[in-house]
Structures are given as C-alpha cells and as structure tokens.
Amino acid sequence: MTAKLDPFAVAPALMKSWMSTSMAVASSLEPSLIELVKIRASQINGCANCLNMHTAEARAKGETEQRIYLLSAWREAPCYSDRERAALGWTEVLTRLSEGHPRDAAYQALKAQFTQEEQVKLTLMINVINGWNRLAVGFGLWIEPEAAKAAMAAVA
C-alpha cells in the first residue's frame, strides 16, 4: 500500500502533540490491557497498520499468542479476566457507536471493574486508538513496529 500523504510531514507540530497525548494516555493503565484494547479496536476498524504494530508490541510486553489470536472471540474465550472483558466490551461499544448498540450493560461491567478515573483513562485510550486507526486507514499509512518505536522515543 502506498500512503496517500504523510501526516507527520504535512502537520508535524500537531502530529507531535497527538503522539505525545497518545503516549500519555497509553501509559495511564496496565500495558497488557492497553494493548488488548488497541488490537480489538484495530480489528473492528480493519486497520492493518495498527494490528501489525500493536500485536508486535503486545508480544514484546509478554502477551501470549493464544490471547492475541482469540481476541476477536473474547466473549467465548476463557483466557481474559473480568477487567479485560469489561474493557473489551467498552471498546466495542465506543468503536461501533454508529451501529447503535446498547451501552448500558457495557457501562455496568466497566463500572464494576474500573474506578471513575480509570473509566476516563480507558475511554481516552479507545478514542486515541480509533483516531490512529482513522489516520492510518484514511491515508494508507504503514509503519513497521521498530520504526514506530523510534518515532515515539524521539517524541518522548
């Protein structure tokens, strides 16, 4: 795939700010949970770039192949905690807002597993990954995980 444009070259100040915000939000909850959320939202959004990047990051942070492979069927798979299930349910509801799924059950599960502050952090993370998915899919972006890691280190 050839990128339609490079948002980092076209709007460097805004993209640097977006990257900094993304990193701050991503570091606000446990890394394994954050990666599961990023992968699940990226699956829903069909973002190959983000799936490639976040599955590699999840593995590097100790996530198992089994849990990565079963993520699209998390409801049926016994390998996720109640906290992870609540996060994944909330991720799906917010990522699929336009489909009009009822949010009450997902929010009740979220409230049972996350403090109010954590609810905000998780919701921000879901917004961030959905934003990255839209940038990558919309502009045809592809960045290898090592290159992304170097770019994030440059911003940090």
Image (spheres, rainbow, N blue to C red):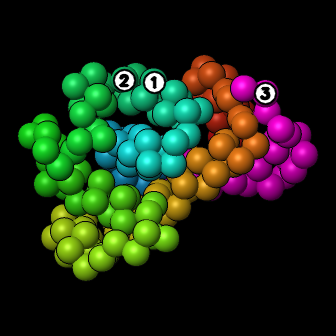
Residue indicated by mark 3: 2
In the image, what residue occupies the spot 52% across and 61% down?
A: 127
Residue nearest the observer in this picture, 108 or 17: 108
Q: Residues within 10 Å of mark 2 (few under 14, many from 20)?
A: some
Viewer can see residue 131: yes
* Horizontal and vertical percent position of residue 67: 24, 31
Q: Which amino acid type is marked by label 2?
A: Arg
* Horizontal and vertical percent position of residue 113: 19, 64
Quadrant in the picture for residue 2 = top right
Judge left or right: residue 109 versus residue 32.
left
In the image, is residue 130 above or below residue 110? above
Determine the main secondary structure of the stretch shown in magenta.
helix
Residue that extends furthest to the front in the rendered view of this protein: 99
Residue indicated by mark 1: 56
Q: Residues within 10 Å of mark 1 (few under 14, many from 20)?
A: some
Q: Which segment did they paint magenta? A: 1-25
Q: Is residue 11 magenta?
A: yes
Q: Residues within 10 Å of mark 3 (few under 14, many from 20)?
A: few
Residue indicated by mark 2: 59
Secondary structure state at the residue bearing disc 1: helix
